[in-house]
Image: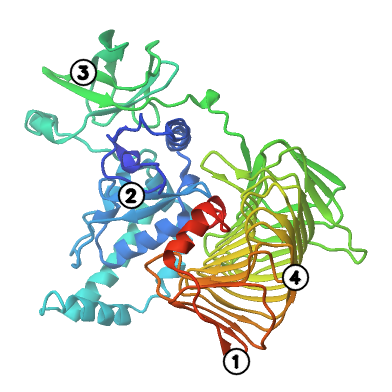
Amino acid sequence: MKEFFFRKLFFKETFIGNPNFDWNFYNENNYKKFRKIISYFMQNYLNNNEKIINLSGFLNEFILASLFNNFHPLNYSNIRFYLNKFTGKLDPITSDASYTFEPEPRYINNLNYILIFQKIVSSPEFKNAYEKEIKKIDISKLCEVFKKEIIKLNEIFFLEKEKECILKTNENVLNYFKKIETMNNVSLKQFNIEKINKRFSKFKHINFIHFLNGDVKIFNLVNLPIYLHKVIYKENGITKEHIIDKIISPNNTLKNPFFINTQIKGSLDDKISLKYKIYDKSFEITNHISLIPENELSLNFNVIEEDYYLNKKDYKFDKTTIFTKPVLIKSGIKIRLCKNCSLIFLSDLITERSKKGKETIIYGDDIGGLAIIDENKNNTVLIDGIKIKNSNGIKNIFSDYSAALLLYNISNFTLNNLKIMNANVEDAINLIDSNGKLFNVHIDGSNIGSDGIDSDFSNIDAEMIHLENLNGDGIDFSKSKFKLKNFKAKNIGDKAVSVGETSSGVIYDANINSSETCIASKDNSYVLIKKLYGDLCNSFTFASYIKKRNYNHAKIKVEKEIKYKNYLLTEEAIIENGDNLLKPNSSYKEIFEFYNYGTFKKYQIQ
């Protein structure tokens, strides 16, 4: 289990690789989810499914390796993987790169140790993409930039020699493509039998995977027969043995593993060892986690890898469905989702809106939601005339994302005539690292735990936004820029507009009623208010303060002086009401108390 790229996989809150796979998972709350995730990826790996790797991310790493003629970072011992929980794919993160060019491509065969990598680079899609991207690179300019960087570390740099080496590398890479086209199997490490006794201690000979039903798959990593003696495991703290006495053939590679059923079920510690021999030398290898068998994994999602047009009157999806190609949705249709099922779009999404203004309704009992994710920020997203009812939050095997509608990494989106009703989620709409426009959006949700719209690292232009009956904030900005026009909010349990963490924007006109706080600016944020109507809110009309001590200012500026009911202002912050500069009336300690015990509800504030 510690062999190949999964020895570098580690799933916790950050979903980031860890150099030591022998981490103790067993006391973690997410242990069951981890087992399911690692089982999913290992099954894909064994089935030689290269689509679990982000192709564009791997292409970038491969181009860097080829330009510097150094493929050492792509060795399985030097690469980590980030699990993108929105796309379900692994993004490679390489390490141990050097500041030198290699005279020969001696590391390129490292790719052969990883079955999926070998399949990726031998595909026509990858070869075409490589040739296209490599032509865009100005080698002379690259060398000049590299020279400026390297001179900081070494005053000796032979520019022409290095340029020649780069050009030679690309020729070698293209020749490598031609070579691996004819390969039927992965070229695993081959041993010279005459020298085997000298090299035993340097290499791993077998790898194995144990499943919860007792199945064991064993892979021979050397060109030698291996005598498998027994399996050692623990049951109720007592060490036990299961005798095998079988020969593992050199043909039992990744594509053709040696299979046995031990009847040993996966225990809590999952520590299972194999004892084996090569000639007269004995060895032992240990596995630390048992996987879920493929037929018991119950991965409740479907992938559609072709252009898709939803143009019938009614549709029903019984599984979470991932669309990898463009999708067009006709106006006025009904899409019924099963419980906890979601629609996830990884490419263009366009919804038609008829002249009659018919809505497309997405509904069901406790459905998941809609997620639109763009790996490369080049997709078209135009949603017009959609109503989402009864959302319980987007869910897949990788994560639970509590939003009815999620936009992630979208460079230019348009959301028109959108309604979200009766949602039982944290946020109705979540925008992450996305830019676009919202027009005529209506959110009504007493079951929404936090915000109507949550914007993180995004730039939005919003008009005719109507939010009501929310427990948390109406719209919450974090590290974002915004424009709000014709904004209406009613019965908001916290702040109608919350602006924080270096966000800035303009509120052209807002009508806010029956809410706790109208507008708040905090933590290096700035808000310009042109017009504000309504009952001026229950607790504060304005609030400008520091919540997190690593920030040092915040500001609200009202263009023309207006009446206000009350305000909240700390020493570091500013509120300008027309020409009047309001005086501070609170402290950081009071802000802390507000968040924990008072007006600002701790579990709602981001």
SS type, badge 4:
loop
Q: Secondary structure at mark 1?
A: loop
* Mark toward the viewer: 1 or 3: 1
* Label disc, if present, on residue 80 of the rendered structure: 2
Is residue 174 visible to us here? no
Most foreground residue, 570 or 102: 570
Disc nearer the start of the sequence (1/3) = 3
Q: Amino acid at mark 1?
A: Asp
Q: In the displayed orientation, state which residue is furthest to the bottom.
A: 579
User: Which residue sits furthest left?
Assistant: 198
298 with respect to 335 (left or right) = left
Q: Is residue 193 left or right of residue 359?
A: left
* Disc 1: which residue: 579
Residue type at the position of mark 3? Tyr
Give the mark nearest the N terminus, 2 or 4.
Answer: 2
Q: Residues within 10 Å of mark 3 (few under 14, many from 20)?
A: many
Residue 178 percent across, percent down from the top left:
38, 55
Q: Residue at x 22, y 77 (%)?
A: 149
Q: Residue at x 53, y 28 (%)?
A: 297
Q: Image point 23% across, 20% down: which residue?
A: 226
Question: What colour-coding does the image apply?
Answer: rainbow
Disc sitting over residue 535 in the figure:
4
- CB under 8 Å between discs 1 and 2: no
Q: Nearer the viewer, residue 255 or 377?
A: 377
| Quarter of the figure with residue 332 | bottom right
- State the residue position of label 3: 276
